[in-house]
Amino acid sequence: MATVTRLDLANALRDRFGLSAADSYKMIDIIFDEIEQSLINGEDVKITGFGTFKILSKSARIGRNPKTGIPAVISARRVATFRPSTTFRKTVALK
């Protein structure tokens, strides 16, 4: 199983649109930075036909160490989530 990296995405932009390698890498960085900043600011990021990124706030809770079974406090935190769009789910399911 292969992993798609930023470089792979930049190369795809370069090949598809004839951009320079530097410009295509900058575009990828700008897109990811914009998504990151929007999430940091508490905004949802919806990409039509792809999905929605959100930040959820999770409360502190008691959990257990799976190895020892000893109760432990799991601190409150914010987590990023992704929910694929219906179109995306259908497309991936067909492949």
Image (spheres, rainbow, N blue to C red):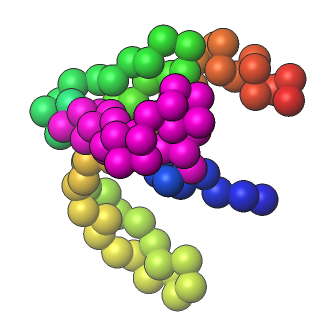
On the rendered image, what quadrant is the N terminus found in?
bottom right
Q: Identify the residue at image location x=44%, y=23%.
A: 52
- Give the residue furthest to the left: 41
Q: Identify the residue at image location x=24%, y=62%.
A: 75
Is residue 13 or residue 69 the one in the foreground?
A: 13
- Give the residue furthest to the right: 94
Q: Is residue 55 visible?
A: no
- Give the residue furthest to the bottom: 68
Q: Is residue 37 visible?
A: yes
65 within the magenta span: no
Left or right: residue 17 compared with residue 60: right
The answer to whether residue 72 is above or below residue 50 is below
Q: Quadrant of residue 40?
A: top left
18 within the magenta span: yes
Residue 54 image point, x, y percent: 34, 31
On the rendered image, what quadrant is the C terminus found in?
top right
Q: Quadrant of residue 84?
A: top right
Residue 44 image point, x, y percent: 29, 23
Is residue 69 or residue 55 the one in the foreground?
A: 55
Count of number-bearing discs: 0
Left or right: residue 15 compared with residue 57: right
Secondary structure, magenta segment, majority class: helix
Q: Identify the residue at image location x=56%, y=85%.
A: 67
Q: Quadrant of residue 57?
A: top left
Task: Please state the extent of the stretch shown in magenta in the rendering.
Answer: 8-37
Q: Identify the residue at image location x=86%, y=23%.
A: 94
Residue 38 image point, x, y percent: 21, 31
